[in-house]
Amino acid sequence: MKIYLKSAFALVSAFMQFNDAFSQRQKKGDAFPTYEQIRGDKKETVDYVAPRSQGSVGVIPRYTVRDHHLGAFTYQEDSVTYILNGRKVKSKKKAEYEVNRKDVRIERVSIGEVGKDGKRIVEIDYEPFKVE
């Protein structure tokens, strides 16, 4: 009985030695992910990051432009010089009527700074729709 016990003990001891040596040879992966693992697919591009909202989580504000001439007619009449398609228009009312017609497509709106004479220059280039 003693021989069986000794051989079993020797076998268990040899197995434990082999197991320790085998486990030391294996390289254990780092628990912290690498940059490539975090980044994911290289083809994927994130071009918009939602801002943090104060009240509700996950609500993305949407903005729409309702004024197609970008507020060019919000200034006082005597403080603005309007230039429509390269020609000077004296009246704010006349300029606004001409631009707000339904058969006009706005090409460019340029609102300048206040000049030395105290007036702001607003240039609007538009093109009439072609009716075929």
Image (tube, rainbow, N blue to C red):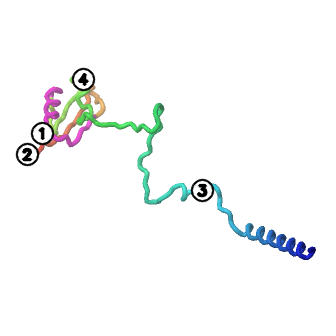
Q: Which mark is residue 103?
A: 1
- Residue hosting label 2: 131
Residue drawn at 68 percent across, 63 percent down = 28
- Residue type at numbered disc 3: Pro
What is the CA distance from the residue labelled 1 to the residue labelled 4? 26 Å
Above or below: residue 26 compared with residue 116: below
What is the CA distance from the residue labelled 1 to the residue labelled 3? 59 Å
Above or below: residue 64 compared with residue 46: above
Q: Secondary structure at mark 2?
A: loop
Is 67 placed left or right of 6 in the picture?
A: left
Q: Quadrant of residue 111?
A: top left
Q: Quadrant of residue 115?
A: top left
- Residue type at numbered disc 1: Asp
Q: Secondary structure at mark 3?
A: loop
| Discs 2, 1 touching: Cβ within 8 Å | yes
User: In terms of sequence position, does the residue under pointer 2 or pointer 3 come before the other?
Assistant: 3
- Residue hosting label 4: 76
Please name whichever residue, 103 or 124, is drawn nearer the observer in this view of the structure.
Answer: 103
Instruction: Between label 2 and label 4, give the one nearer the viewer.
Output: 2
- Residue type at numbered disc 2: Val
- Residue hosting label 3: 33
Instruction: Between label 3 and label 4, give the one nearer the viewer.
Output: 3
- Whether the magenta-drawn stretch holds residue 100 is answered as yes
User: In terms of sequence position, does the residue under pointer 1 or pointer 3 come before the other?
Assistant: 3
Instruction: Between label 1 and label 4, give the one nearer the viewer.
Output: 1
User: In terms of sequence position, does the residue under pointer 3 or pointer 4 come before the other?
Assistant: 3
Please name whichever residue, 23 or 15, is drawn nearer the observer in this view of the structure.
Answer: 15
User: In terms of sequence position, does the residue under pointer 2 or pointer 1 come before the other?
Assistant: 1
